[in-house]
Image: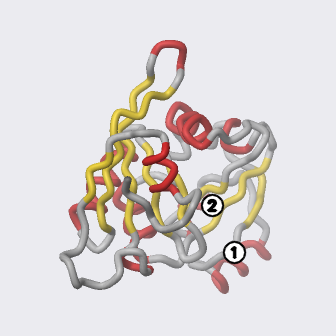
Amino acid sequence: PPSDGREGGILHQVAARGERLIEGGPAPGAEDPFVHESAPYVLYDSADSPGSQIELKSARVLWSADTAAVKQAAFILRGGGLVAFPTETVYGLGADAVNEQAVAKVFEVKGRPHFDPLIVHVASCEEARSLWTQYPDAALKLMRAFWPGPLTLVLPKSKKIPDLVTAGLPVVAIRMPHHRVALDLIRLAGCPV
């Protein structure tokens, strides 16, 4: 079965569950598909099944160097689907962070406990500010100095953020990844991820 080369990696997990994978990628001899900008997306085409269980109908691996793949990933996010995407630090399984049903799929697919909050990724400082009710000057200075980058700011959340994202906490963790593909995906999707 397809694998991302890491035991427990997202592609390995999908293959282990027996989901159908449709792979595409660089031509043989092209650069390593698991290096930074050529990292894969796993796009989940999911549907709610009876009893609110998530049934993954298929997972497609699309390559981030492909502009059409990023557009397709953004389309899937806007439609309430899930996308595994690269950042400069880790791969994340993302959903539209303001769509509670989409966020619930992340918890279901990962088997993540609901008391474990998610980090929200944004493509601009303005987008982050719209998701917080207040942000001190110190937060703005940190954003200007370290974003995009692996800095996460935790501040009081706005009503746009579902309680499921924050495990019921009054604050939300937000960061802006320093990865071109992640930023393009978030911008094209038009939503925090």
Q: Quadrant of residue 92?
A: bottom right
Residue 129 bears which disc, if any?
2
Within 10 angstroms of label 2, few (less than 14), some, or many (20 or more) residues?
Answer: some
Check disc 2 and report its element: helix, strand or loop: helix
Looking at the image, which residue is at 32% across and 57% down? 61
178 left or right of 39 in image = right
* Residue type, mark 1 in image: Leu
Within 10 angstroms of label 1, few (less than 14), some, or many (20 or more) residues?
Answer: some
Cα distance in 3D space between marks 1 and 2 = 15 Å
Looking at the image, which residue is at 58% across and 69% down? 90
- The image shows residue 136, relative to residue 132, as above or below, that is below
Residue topped by disc 1: 151
Q: Nearer the viewer, mark 1 or mark 2?
A: 1
Looking at the image, which residue is at 33% across and 39% down? 58
Check disc 1 and report its element: helix, strand or loop: loop
How many marks overall? 2
In the displayed image of the protein, which residue is found farthest to the front?
Answer: 1
Looking at the image, which residue is at 61% across and 79% down? 149
Q: Position of residue 30 (x, y in %)?
A: 24, 83
* Residue type, mark 2 in image: Arg
- The image shows residue 170, relative to residue 37, as above or below, that is above
